[in-house]
Structure formats: C-alpha cells, structure tokens
Amino acid sequence: MNASCPPGLSLPPRSLSAEMLAQLQARFGAQLSTAAAVRQQHGRDESPFDVPPPDAVLFCQSTEDVADAVRLAAQHRVPVIPYGAGSSLEGHLLAVQGGLSLDLSRMSQVLALQPEDLTVTVQAGVLRSQLNQAVRHAGLFFPIDPGADASIGGMTATRASGTNAVRYGTMRENVLGLTVVTAQGEVIRTGTRARKSSAGYDLTRLLVGSEGTLGVITDITLRLHPLPEHVAAAICSFPDVASAVQTTIALIQMGVPIARCELMDAHAVRAVNARDHLGLKECPLLLMEFHGSPAGVAEQTAVVQELAREHGGEDFQWATTPEERTRLWAARHHAFFSTLQMRPGSRAITTDACVPISCLAENVVQALDEAAATGLPHAAVGHVGDGNFHMIYLIDPARPEEREVVEQLNERLVRRAIASGGTCTGEHGIGLHKQGFLREEAGEGGVAMMRALKAALDPHQILNPGKIFQA
C-alpha cells in the first residue's frame, strides 16, 4: 500500500561526525558547505515530503572527488546522496538519515563526441539542453526529454523518459556505458561504445534506474540520433479524453512512426493558456510531432488526421517553424508548474503509471472521473504514445485531509495500472513514494532479489538509503 509516510522516513539518523567533517574540509576545502541555505536547497525536491536537510553538501568536480568522498563515507558509515538538478518527484534526493549530499552539477563537461559513431560521453552534471546544444553542430541530438531540464546523471539514475520515448525509447535504450563509483569508493566502467555486447552481466542496465542506491554515476556514454530532415508538429482538439486516447491507440496499432504524442486534458490546457498565453481551445488535446523526410512526414500526418477525424478530432493547428514548435513544447514541459499556479499556495502531488496501450483509455478516464468527484484541482498529461500518463493533484498543505484524499486517488490509480498488466511508475521512479506498490508489482520474491543485490554491492547501506525499498 502507498503510504503518506513511507517507511524510509522512519530510519534512524546517521549524521556526519566531527572527525569526518574535518577530513572532508581538509580534502575539499571550499567545495564543502555546511551553510543552512545550501543544505536546505539540497534537501528539497518536487515531492510532497518534508525531511531535514543533509548535514553537508560537497560540490564535486571530478570522479576522483566522488571516489574520495565515498571512501570517507564508507569508513564512517555515513550516507551519501547524489544530487543533480533537484527536479525529482518521488523524494529520490532526500537525506532521510542525514549524511552528505554529493552535488554533481559542476561536473558539466562534454568529454568526447564521436559523430561518426553517433555517441557522446558526458559528465553526470551536464544538462539535457546543454548536451543538445553541444551536439547540434554535428547534425545530431539526444531525444530523451523529461519535462525539467534535468541532468544526464539524474536522468540515468531514474531511467528517465519523456515526450520522444514512443519513437526513440528511454534512457535504458540510449545509455551505452557508465563510469560509476561503488559503495567502497572504487571507480568502475560498465559497457562500451559498441551498439551491443554479450559480455557477462549487463551492469549498465542494472545501474540505469537504480536511483543512486547501487553506485554514484559520474560519466555516461550515450547514443545520439541524427536530426530529422523534416519536422512538423500539430495540435488536435477532441470532445473528451477518451476520444483523444482512442486516436492514440489506433495510430500506434497501425504502426504510424510518430515521434511524439502527448495528451493534455482540459485542466492542463487551461493552465498552460494562463501561463504561456497560447490561446488553445480549452478541451482535451493531442500534441503530436512527426519526424522524417518531407514525403514521409506528409504521409504520417495524412493518416493521423484521418484517424483523428474518426474519433471526433478537430481544429488541427500546425507548427512547422522551429520557433512555433519550441513554444508549443515549452508549454507542454511547463504543464506541472502551470498547473501549480492554478491554486496559489498549493502543493502538487504527482503520480505516473504506464499501462499496455489497449488499456490506456479506461485507466486515464477512471483516474480523471475519480479526481473530479473529490472537487480538488487536478490535471492530466501523458506520453500516451507509449501508455504513460501523469496525474497532478493540488492540495492545501495546511489541510492534511486533502493529502489523504489524494493518496487514496493515487492508490486506486496505480493498482488499476498494475492490474492492467502495467507498472506503478513509467518514469518517475520509486524513490520514497511508491515502495509499497513495488512489492505489489514485483512480488516479494522480486523485491528480495533487489535487496540481495543492494546488500552485496552496498553492505553498509550508505548509498541513498531508504529509497526503492527499505533494506
């Protein structure tokens, strides 16, 4: 069961000792901060949990910095929590036992670009937008785009996804290799720049999505993709959410190679209109993008328009210039914060689930109907091309009864997804918030195997403790 107070929040504190603090100061000098404002910044993400901040923050500048810090933490049995851009939604970066926050944002170099191989190696602190700016001159791009301008290290640790996943996959498909610092402070390399390998256990895939609990990722080798020859984006409005989702199901089942297919319900459209002054018709819509040759894009768009009309789609609006497309996708990426502004002073609780495409319509509609029945402000958005949808609920933080209602909504939504053959999270990760659901999805045997891996690789439980499951 999902609880508003996850078990990870009840772990006993393991704070930095004066001895360890002195050793850190001697090794790192001004890179280490114990200032209250810095600690508070690194003790807060976009989750609904309030947790005391870490005892100190270390601004790492190299893999060697990370390794030295982790070796000290292992010696003193003190937790270390990797920190990227601070945009996680499920409490991943919260210092539930105190300890040391490892800020990797200064590790922001693009280390090697191999355009002939369509690969690039970057440090963990490189931001998604920074990476695409760095490789654009070579006619390449990196397609994974979670709503926030997240760091590549954080995206790797949470197995991030985004609007392009329906065509280009997630971080799982686009990470080729890693440099990782283990719980003992050893630096290892997983994977290669080759497109495939059968050499032993797939340690790269084990670490992608491990949420900082098995190692601290410092460098990442990524698969890049050629910039498409032609791009077109379109908005299509629908009479209801079910019609929009049924259109998506039809185009996926027909094999239309759409690059992006995003759902926004009427509440989300109203929110982005208010924030970004778009003037969109305030009803459910699909925001779609097509990549390929001019002829290929024309063929795709003709098929999609026909399918949309069959399901009541109307008011197609096209954006063919980069500026128009950027404006539309920026509004979609801002949907979380746009929705938050619809209830000043509120706090957002978000959830995501991913289901087989055939079950998508009923899952989304039931989630919206249940939310509407409570009277609480809410919105739905989703990467519906791959069966992934998100609910955003707004609560008054001074009214715990609203939080309880939303947790019940979340519980029903996720359990329906699991019963449909889906997953409790398509891209947010488990963190603190969805640990009970992981047991329901993977079973006690599956979680026991995960615990065994954690115990073998991190016997002293210093790497981001309390996350995914209670060890």
Image: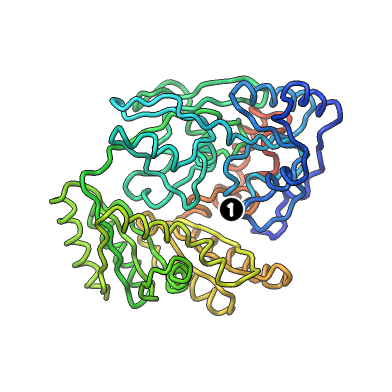
Return the residue found at the far left. Answer: 295
Q: Give the x, y percent position of residue 62.
A: 59, 24
Give me the residue at 68% from left, 44% from top. 42
* Along the viewing direction, whichever of 368 and 253 lies nearer the viewer: 368
Q: Which residue is mark 1?
A: 89
Q: Amino acid at mark 1?
A: Leu
Residue 129: x and y in percent read 44, 43
| Residue 346 placement (x, y as % from top left) | 64, 68
Q: Is residue 404 left or right of residue 210?
A: right
Which residue occupies the foreground of this view, 217 or 421? 217
Q: Is 29 above or below relative to 229?
A: above
Provide residue 11's location: percent of width, then percent of height. 78, 45
Along the viewing direction, whichever of 104 and 186 lies nearer the viewer: 104
The correct choice, above or below, for 287 with respect to 31 in the image is below
Q: In the displayed structure, does residue 360 sit left or right of residue 231?
A: right
Q: Secondary structure at mark 1?
A: loop
